Image (spheres, rainbow, N blue to C red):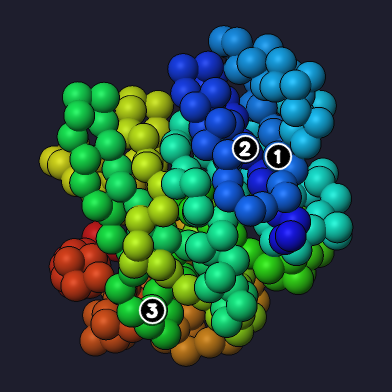
């Protein structure tokens, strides 16, 4: 039976974390251990997780009392502080989703041919609304510098990929959490830039809860679109792209020298190559507009 380590990041999750843990524990035909890192919280998240450790020997809560301030730093901590050598596969988990019971077996079946896995999800809201979040468009040459492979909570990896990423992460650990906020974007970029094969499953394998505390969430309404636009206008998005490219040693690539590092002329260079930068047509059109208007 395949052995899987599930890395779960938590923060003020008392409303949802029990349902999430149950959906992980009930995975079919998998031997798994769950490692939980809790960003210093003001609710009962720690108590709930500790109660699970007394009933489930395969659940470990990492030492508590650190304030990370975001999921990215919390996941970096999970990777740095967890011994992953004894596992076949490593999966990421948020605190508030609901996994399909065959999520891990489906991922592992695809990882016989690939190195990394992610999937589409069904977003759902408390008022009963549901929506397919489709991230499974064909990957393109440079999409990994401009977007993640979908929600990081769907990611599953062969052990060797994570060991390589962890080794690299530890070399940059002191600063990287301040410079790069989104762990799922970074690890997708790391894997693709190192030639690892990534499969984005068009079948949704989990329910992706939407609520006010989501750090990112879906981009399906005017409020969410406005939030993303403000991030782009503030140059946060460009800075993240530049930082990821820099950390991954891509400064000598044409996309960096003639594009990212070349001001407005660079934006025009990127504009004519926009089909290589984002997977989805809608996102390509939006990025093209931002490049043309010099907002990016």
User: Residue 75 versus residue 101: which sits nearer the camera?
Assistant: 101
Cα–Cα gap, marks 3 and 2: 32 Å
Q: Which residue is mark 3?
A: 139
Of labels 2 and 1, earlier in sequence is 2
Task: Using the image, determine if residue 287 lies above or below residue 76.
Answer: below
Q: Name which residue lies at 58% across and 39% down.
A: 26
> Can residue 16 be seen from the camera position used here?
yes
Name the quadrant of the N terminus. bottom right
Q: Name which residue lies at 66% across and 27% down.
A: 38
Q: Residues within 10 Å of mark 1 (few under 14, many from 20)?
A: many
User: Residues at badges 3 and 2 in contact (C-beta under 8 Å)?
Assistant: no
Report whether 96 appears left or right of 116. Answer: left
In this rendering, the label closer to the viewer, 3 or 2: 2
Residue 110 place in picture, x, y as percent = 53, 73
User: Residue 69 versus residue 263: which sits nearer the camera?
Assistant: 69
> Can residue 268 be seen from the camera position used here?
no
Cα–Cα gap, marks 2 and 1: 9 Å
Q: Name which residue lies at 13% across and 41% down.
A: 222
Q: Which residue is mark 1?
A: 34
Q: Which residue is mark 2?
A: 25
User: Residues at badges 2 and 1 in contact (C-beta under 8 Å)?
Assistant: yes
Of labels 3 and 2, earlier in sequence is 2
In this rendering, the label closer to the viewer, 2 or 1: 2
């Amino acid at each position: 039976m395949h052995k899987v380590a599930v890395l779960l990041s938590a923060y003020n999750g008392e409303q949802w974390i029990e349902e999430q843990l149950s959906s992980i524990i009930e995975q079919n035909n998998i031997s798994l251990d769950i490692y939980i890192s809790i960003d210093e919280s003001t609710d009962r998240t720690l108590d709930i997780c500790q109660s699970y450790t007394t009933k489930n020997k395969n659940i470990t809560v990492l030492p508590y009392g650190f304030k990370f301030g975001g999921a990215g730093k919390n996941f970096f901590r999970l990777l740095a502080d967890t011994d992953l050598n004894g596992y076949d596969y490593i999966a990421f988990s948020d605190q508030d989703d609901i996994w399909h019971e065959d999520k891990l077996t489906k991922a592992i079946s695809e990882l016989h041919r690939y190195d990394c896995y992610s999937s589409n999800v069904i977003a759902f809201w408390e008022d009963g609304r549901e929506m397919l979040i489709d991230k499974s468009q064909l990957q393109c040459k440079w999409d990994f510098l401009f977007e993640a492979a979908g929600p990081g909570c769907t990611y599953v990896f062969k052990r060797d990929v994570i060991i390589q990423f962890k080794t690299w992460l530890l070399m940059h650990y002191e600063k990287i959490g301040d410079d790069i906020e989104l762990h799922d974007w970074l690890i997708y970029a790391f894997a693709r830039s190192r030639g690892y094969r990534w499969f984005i499953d068009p079948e949704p394998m989990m329910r992706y809860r939407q609520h006010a505390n989501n750090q990112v969430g879906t981009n399906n309404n005017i409020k969410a679109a406005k939030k993303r636009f403000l991030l782009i206008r503030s140059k946060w998005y460009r800075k993240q792209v530049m930082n990821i490219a820099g950390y991954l040693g891509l400064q000598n690539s044409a996309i960096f020298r003639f594009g990212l590092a070349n001001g407005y002329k660079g934006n025009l260079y990127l504009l004519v190559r926009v089909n290589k930068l984002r997977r989805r047509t809608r996102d390509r059109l939006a990025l093209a507009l931002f490049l043309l208007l010099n907002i990016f």
